[in-house]
Amino acid sequence: MEIMQFLNTRVVPLALILVMVGLGLSLTPADFRRVIVFPKAVAVGLVAELIVPPVIAFVLAWLLAPSPAIAVGAVIVAACASGVTSNAYTFAARADVALCVTLSALTSIITVFTIPFLTYLALQVFFEQGQIPALPVGEMLRTLITVTIVPVAAGMIVRALAPGVALRALEPLRRMVMGLLVVVLSAAALSSYGVIRDNLATAGLLVVLMNVFTMAAGYGVARLARLPAAQTVTIIYEVGVQNLALAMLITLTILRSPDLAVTALLYAVVMPAAGLAFLPAARRPLRDDEAPHPA
């Protein structure tokens, strides 16, 4: 129990801070100017990321979630818009990495305020009155600002003052983060083994459908907006890949509820598989697009 408390209170926040520092190290002022230069792609991406996944999560949780904790966990995962993981998939697919970085930066700031609202709404919808877990909104806001906006800003300062150091630090930092996340996810899965086992069938179907539907919705929104292939693929990954480090921080560190973390643990298994499986399909339209529109 002491080990889990140490992981939840120390390792999970550290992992997220490192994720956000890594995002900041990859950012330059040009990434924010892209909002003005290419407003359509950025606007479509933000709408798709911030609205589509929570709506899908609420609907699927209402239909399929075997318990209120699984349902609320699904909404929390959906509310945690993509972090640096989507950048890796976008780069591997040879899509619009610049657009991806811009969207990740903007959503990292915006979700500090949308996550508490969506979490509160999910608790009210799925838990019965008298059984609703306490939601420390003030603590949540302070924690989210501390572990997201502040480290992103710190990373950007390092990038501006010492760009060579920032670029050299990115890969070692990524490896460190992956190691920490593997430790946290493994420990959390072991501590919640009984809940995962009891809800695997229904909750597993929920997270699979949520991942597939969000990626499909990202594609649909991008195509409706008539975005080029490179930007379409980028938005698919931005919408379908969630920031699981942030979801673990909310469920394990702020809300202190392993049951709420079960959905994120299952999503951690499904999301990489779906992302990798989509890569071959993503590269096909990019090869056919003779002049991809850079963001």
Image (cartoon, rainbow, N blue to C red):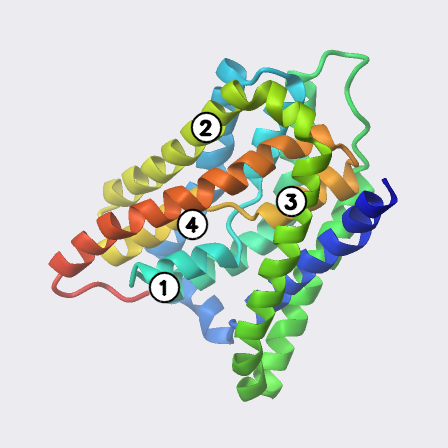
Q: Is residue 107 above or below residue 131?
A: below
Residue 248, image x, y percentages: 67, 43
Q: Which residue is mark 1?
A: 91
Q: Nearer the viewer, mark 4 or mark 3?
A: 3
Report whether 24 appears left or right of 184.
left
Tags 2 and 1 in contact by the CB under 8 Å rule?
Answer: no
Structural distance between the alpha carbons of marks 4 and 2: 15 Å
Of the numbered discs 2 and 3, the one sitting upstream in the chain is 2
Q: Nearer the viewer, mark 2 or mark 1?
A: 1
Q: Is residue 161 visible?
A: yes
Structural distance between the alpha carbons of marks 4 and 1: 12 Å
Structural distance between the alpha carbons of marks 4 and 3: 25 Å
> What residue appears at the point 81 percent right and 36 percent down from the top-left corner?
136
Please name the amino acid that badge 2 sits on.
Answer: Ile
Q: Which residue is mark 3?
A: 186
Please name the amino acid that badge 3 sits on.
Answer: Ser
Quadrant location, the C terminus: bottom left
Tags 1 and 3 in contact by the CB under 8 Å rule?
Answer: no
- In front of the other: 46 or 130: 130
Of the numbered discs 4 and 2, the one sitting upstream in the chain is 2
Of the numbered discs 4 and 1, the one sitting upstream in the chain is 1
> What residue appears at the point 58 percent right and 15 percent down from the top-left corner?
66
Q: Is residue 122 visible?
A: no
Structural distance between the alpha carbons of marks 2 and 1: 26 Å
Q: Which mark is residue 238?
A: 4
Residue 203, image x, y percentages: 53, 23
